[in-house]
Amino acid sequence: MKQGAIAILPLAFGAAIYGFAFGILAAQTGFPWWGVAMMSGAVHAGSSQIVAVEQFSGGSALLGAALAGAALNLRYIGIVASLAEVLQGLPLRFRLLAIHITGDENWALTMAERAKDPAVGAAFLLGSGFVMISVWIASTAFGAVLGASLPDLEQFGLGFAFTAAFIAMARGMWRGHRNTLPWLISFAVTGVLVITGLPKAYAIVCGALCGVTLSLLMRHTRVRER
């Protein structure tokens, strides 16, 4: 666990920055700091929390905000499925805990380290996950506390923090040229759907599903050729 906790620190620092930015955004929408902290601990999915808060700020109903966040979180089905081998042999309570504290950053780091060393497993995932969820809760709550005194998010250059975090995660998950076509398809489909007016959360999910489907087809084709 210690290895994972130490390895995740650079990513945790980045998450703290956009967690702070999210806290400000949530405070501007009317969330109390303790509500932000509870949301961060219970949901623990930064992108869906951001989308849900944006839906609230746009006047959407509670159900619409919840559905938008849930749609964006569909990617966790694939993430959890990819952890089957990592969590194998753990008691159910520890598997559920590991799943809950798994986010994009510590999942990507664990899988990247596991590709280098197959011995990396559940302990690494749990150690990095505990650090990430603690940092996320603290940074979002702190941002919400100071939100009233920092009314303009863009004024401090924090608006790009969300994009930068996803770019960093994407770079860590790059596995070479075989990713090129699925990624391009995902980006193209998402971009077209956003331009045509589909809500961003659903556009991202549709783009991701297209990319995953193409990736599976390509993998199946390579297996058959062998």
Image (tube, helix red, strand yellow):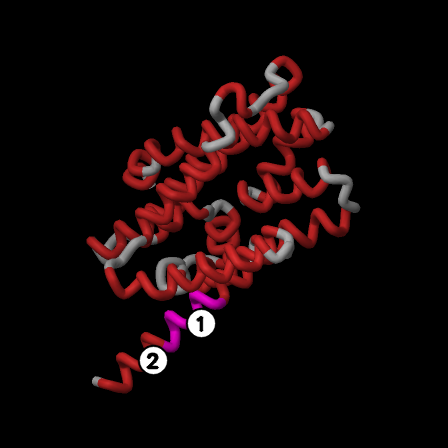
Of residue 224 and residue 108, the one placed in the foreground of this image is 224
The residue depicted at 66 percent of the width and 38 percent of the height is 53
Q: Main secondary structure of the magenta part?
A: helix
Q: Is residue 170 left or right of residue 72?
A: left
Q: Is residue 74 magenta?
A: no
Which residue is denoted by mark 1 in the rendering? 213
Helix, strand or loop at label 2? It is helix
Q: Earlier in the sequence, mark 1 or mark 2?
A: 1
In the visual, does 168 lie left or right of 101?
Answer: left
Q: Is residue 74 left or right of residue 223?
A: right
Q: Position of residue 98 (x, y in %)?
A: 46, 50
Q: Position of residue 223 (x, y in %)?
A: 27, 81
Residue 149 drawn above or below residue 142: above
Q: Is residue 31 above or below residue 189?
A: above
**Residue type, numbered disc 1:** Thr
Residue span colored magenta: 210-217
Number of numbered discs on residues: 2
Numbered circle sitting on residue 220: 2
* Image location (x, y in percent) of residue 225: 24, 85
Quadrant location of the C terminus? bottom left
Whether residue 133 is visible: yes
Residue 89 appears in the figure: no
* Rendering coords of residue 134 (x, y %): 49, 32
Q: Residue at x 70, y 50 (%)?
A: 66
User: Which three-letter amino acid code belongs to the residue tagged 2?
Assistant: His
Q: CA distance from mark 1 to mark 2?
A: 11 Å
